[in-house]
Image (cartoon, coloured by chain):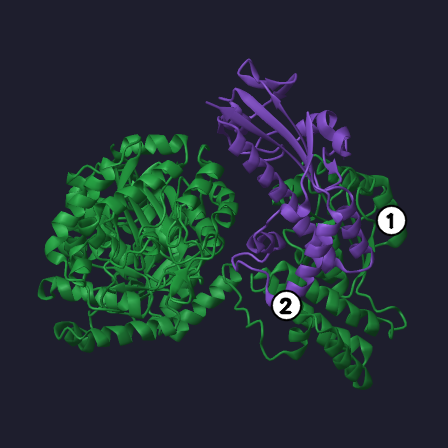
Amino acid sequence: MEVIEIPPQEIEIPQRAIAARMGFKGIGEIPDHFKPIYEELISLLLKVSKPLIAFDDFVPSMDNGEILIDNVKITGILGKSQLGKSIEITAMLITLGEQIDEEIANFHQSGDDLRSFMLDSIGSEFVEYVARKFDASLRSKKSLKGSARIAPGYVDLPITLNKWFASKFGKAISVTIDPESFVFLPRKTISAFIGWSN
Amino acid sequence: MNREELSKILKDRVLILDGAYGTELMRRGFKESPEEIVLSHPEAIKKLHEEYVNAGSNAILTSTFGASPIKLSKIGLESYHERIVRDAVRIAKSVSGNVLVFGDIGPTGDLPYPLGERTFDQYYDNFQKTASIVIKEGVDAIILETFTDILELKAAYMAVRDISKEIFLIAHLTFEKNSRTLTGTDPVNFAITFDDLDVDAIGINCSLGPEEMLPIFEELSKYTHKFLTVEPDAGAPVLKGEKVEYPVTPEEFAIHMDSYWESGANIIGSCCGSNPLHTRKISTVVGKRGPVDKENKKLFAISSPSSIVNFDKFVVIGERLNPAGKKKLSQAIKDEDINYLIDQAREQVDRGAHGLDINFGVEQTVSKDFMSKSIAAISYKIGSPLSLDIQTYDFLEFVMKRYPGRPLVNSARAVEEEFVKRANLVKKYGGILITLSMGERVPESFEERKRSIEYVLEIAEMVGLTKDRLIFDPIVLAIGAGSDARETLKTINYLDSMGLKSIFGLSNISFGMPDRSFINGAFLAMSILNGLNAAIMNPLDDTVMGNMKASLLLTRKSQIEVEKVQGSDELLNFVLTGAEEKLMKVVDDLIKTEEPVSIIENYLKPVMDKVGDLYGNGKIFLPQLILAAQTAQKAFEKVQKLIPSGGDAGKFVIATVKGDVHDIGKNIVATIVKSAGYKVIDLGRDVPSEKIVEAVERENPVMVGLSAMMTTTAPRIKEVVDELKKKHLNVPVVVGGASLNESLARELGADFYAKSATDAIKYLKMVIKI
C-alpha cells in the first residue's frame, strides 16, 4: 500500500462543476451574487483540506464468474463490465480530512446554512477532483488500458465494499466507517476501483 | 473501414481525433486557407497530419472543411474543387501509421431561406459533390462539422447518406454560449431530431472552449442514442497585437476531458486554436479508456429549428392553416402569398397554439416549392413545430426531406400499404406519425377502432417503427351525422391505458351543429379527462381554450404560470437577493402600522410561498432558495417575538436517522421550514429512533421529518414509524433523501415523500388544514 498527499492548491476544479453541484444547473457558472461567498469558501477549503490517498494494486482472480481481490468478491453488473477483463485492479481511498467537516458543521451551528451547504458542495466536488488528478497520473504511468473509475454505492456495485476499503486503507489516512450505513468518516472521503487490461 | 467495423471499435474504446488545421497553419505562417495550402504546400498539411498522429490521434481529418463548391467559389477556387478534395484525401491517406482518415465537410457559410437565400436543394447538391469524391477516395468516415443551422446539416446528412449507406457518418452542430446554434437550435432539439436519422454519431465542435462547451455536451448526451463526438476550441480567441491567440493551454484543456468521457464521449478531439500538444494531453488522459455506458432519456416531442414541443403536457395544434371554408387563405395559397400564411400562423401561436397543422387544400394545384418554402418560413419565423397535413405521397416526401426539425406527419390509416409507405417516410426523414384508428371504412364502434390500433402496432413492429414514433387519432365523427362520441372517448381511454399517445381533430365533433364552441369545449374536456394528449383545434376560440385550461387544471395536467423572478414585488426581490437590511426596514415600517399576525399572514408567508413556487418551477436554484429562507427567517423571528403566544405556525421535529451522518439536506429543509414561520426542533444527524420518538412525545409537533441519504439507513424510517404507532403517537411523517422515492417512502410507512426542500412546507400546510 502507498499513501500520497496532494497539496490542495494543485487541484483545479472548473467553476462550472461546483456550480452544478450547488444546484446552479445549466448556467455554467456561479451567479455574481454568490461569487464573493464562493471565493471566501474556496480560500477556506484550501486552508482546511488535506487531501490524502491510500492505494494499492491487486491481481484479481475469478470465482464462479465473480471477481475476487484480496478475498473480497466484487459483485454486480457494473463491476463485471468495468473490471471483468482486468489483469490488475487499483483500489483507492481518498479523503480531504476532518477539518472541513468541522467547518461545515460550524456554519450550520451559527445558523448560516447557505455557507454550510456551499462548503459541503465544494468539498464534495473537490474530493472528486482529487480522485481525478490521481486517476490521470495513474493512467499516464500505466501502459495498460484503464476502465472507468467505479465507486461502491453506484449502480449495483455494493456499498458494503466500503468496509473492505476502510479496513485495508483507513488506518493509514485516519478514515473510519459507520458499520451500519457504510459511510466514511470524515465525510469527504471516497473509494474507487480502476481495472487495467491489455 | 465501413460503419459496422468502426462502430465495433467505438464500443470498445475511446478514439482521439486530431486538432485544428486552419488556425495552426496560420500560426505557422501561412496566410491562405487550408484548401489553398493543399494545392500550394501539400507537405505542410502532411507534416501537421503526422504531428497529430505522433501526438496520439487515432483519426485525422482531411483538409476539405471548406472544399465545397459554394465555399470555394467565394475564394475563386471553384474550378479546383475536385482536385483539392481528391488531393486532400490522398495527403491524409499517405500519412504512415495505423490511423483512420475522416473526410471533413464544413458548412457553406450561407443561411437557409427565409433567414438567407440558400435552398435545401442547393445545399444538397453542393455537399453531394464533395461527399462523392471523399467516399470514392476511400475515407473511413465522414464528419459534417461546424454547422450552425439544423436544415443545412440535414441537407449535408441526406447528401452523404444518399450516396452511401456504408459510410460511418458524424454530424456536428456548433453552439453559442447560450446553448443555441446561430439559428436557435438547442442540444436537446438536435439530439431528438438526429436520433431519428441514419447517422452514426452526433456531436459538437468549435466556438466554445472545453469548459463552456461541457454543459451543452452533457445535455446532448442525455437525449441521444448515437455515438458522441466532441471537439472544443482552445478557448475564445484573443487579439494580441496583430496575432490571434487561443488562451486554453493543453494542460487546462485536459482538465475537462474526464468530464466529457464521463458524459459518454466516444471520439474526442479539439478545434480552433489547438495544436498537437493539446492532442497529446487529451490522449494521455482518455486515450486508453473504454467508453462509458450511459442511460438516455427519450422525449415524445416535435420540433422546429428553435423550439421543442413535448407531449408530456397537453399540446394544442392550431387547425387554422387549412383552406377548407376559408376564402382568404385559399386565395393566399393560390397567390403563393407566404406572408398571409405567416400572419395566420402567428395569430394562432399568440393565442396559445404550441404547434400548427398545415394543409394546402387541393394539393395538385399547389407547387411543391411553395409548400416547402411556406413550411420553412413558418418554422423559422414563427418557431412553431408543424404537423404536415399533406396527403399526396410525393409531396409529403418532398416536404419531409426539407423539414428543419422533427414534424408530426398527419396521417396514415390502418391500411397496410398506406401505413407502411408513410411509416417508411417517417423512418427515413424523422418525425412522429399520426395513425388513424380506422381502416378502409369509417369505424362506428370502439371495438373497430381498437382492432385498427392493434393491427397498426403489428405492422409498425414489422416495419421497425417503434411505438414512441406513433400517436393515435381515436377518430372524431360528427355527432350531427348520428355518430356516438362515447366510442371516441372509450378509444382515448384505451390508448391511455396502453401507454400510447393520442391526438384528434376536435372540430369534427360539432360539424353541422349550432353552438359549436360549447360542443367542442365540452367534448375536449371529456377527452382530456379520458387521457387525450393533444388536439388539432382552433386556438382563437376562447370558449374552447377556456374549457381546455379548466379541464387541465381539474385533471392536474396544467402548469401554473410563474411570474418573472425579478418582478415588481419589492419584498420578493429583497429575500431572493439576501438584502436583509432592506427587508428588515420594510418589516420595521410594517410593524408601525400592522398587527404582527397580519405581517406574517399577508406579507412574509406569501413571499415565501412565491419563493417556493419559483424553486418548484425551476426559476431559481437551491442556493437562492436557502438564501431567501435564511433572510426571511430573521424577519419571521422579529415579528413572532411580538406575538404573546409565540406566533409560530406549529412545531416540526426533524432528524437524520440513526447510522446516517449526512445532514446537509436535513439542514436545508429545517431552514426552509423555519422561514415559513414554523418552530423547528432539529435533533441533528445519526439520531437513534427512540430519541426521535421521545421528542415527538415531548414536543407534540404537527409533523415529523426524517432524512435518510443511504439505502442502508432508509429502513430506520420504518423503525421510527412503527415505534410512533406503538405509542399511539398519531403524527404524520414526511421523509426525504437521496435513497428514497415515493413508493419506497410508502413502503416504509411514511405519510409523505418530499422530493425537494419546499415539499415539506406543502405537506405541513396540508396537515394543518386537516
Q: B15 or B727: which is nearer to us?
A: B15
In the rendered view, tell whether residue B634 sits above or below residue B124.
below
| For the residues bearing labels 1 and 2, Cβ distance under 8 angstroms | no
Q: Circle 2 is placed at which residue position?
A: A33
Q: Assess disc 1: are there few (<14), some (14-19) or many (≥20) residues with their C-alpha within 10 Å of its C-alpha.
A: some
Q: B583 or A13: which is nearer to us?
A: A13
Q: B311 or B203: which is nearer to us?
A: B203
Q: Quadrant of residue B678?
A: bottom right
Q: Is residue A21 left or right of residue B56?
A: right
Which mark is drawn over residue B41? none
Residue at left offset 87%, top offset 68%: B646
Name the secondary structure under disc 2: helix
Q: Colour of chain A?
A: purple
**Residue most extreme to the top:** A64
Q: Is residue B689 left or right of residue B403?
A: right
Residue B68 can be seen, yes or no? yes
Residue type, mark 2 in image = His
Residue B328 percent across, percent down from the top left: 19, 78
Kindly report the distance in space between the C-alpha atoms of the residues bearing marks 1 and 2.
39 Å
Q: Quadrant of the C terminus of chain B?
A: bottom right
Q: Quadrant of residue A130?
A: top right
Residue A99 percent across, percent down from the top left: 78, 46
Residue at left offset 68%, top offset 44%: A7
Residue B589 percent across, percent down from the top left: 78, 84
Q: Colour of chain B?
A: green
Q: Quadrant of the N terminus of chain B?
A: top left
Which mark is drawn over residue B695? 1
Residue B427 can be seen, yes or no? no
Q: Is residue B311 left or right of residue B368?
A: right
Residue type, mark 1 in image = Ala
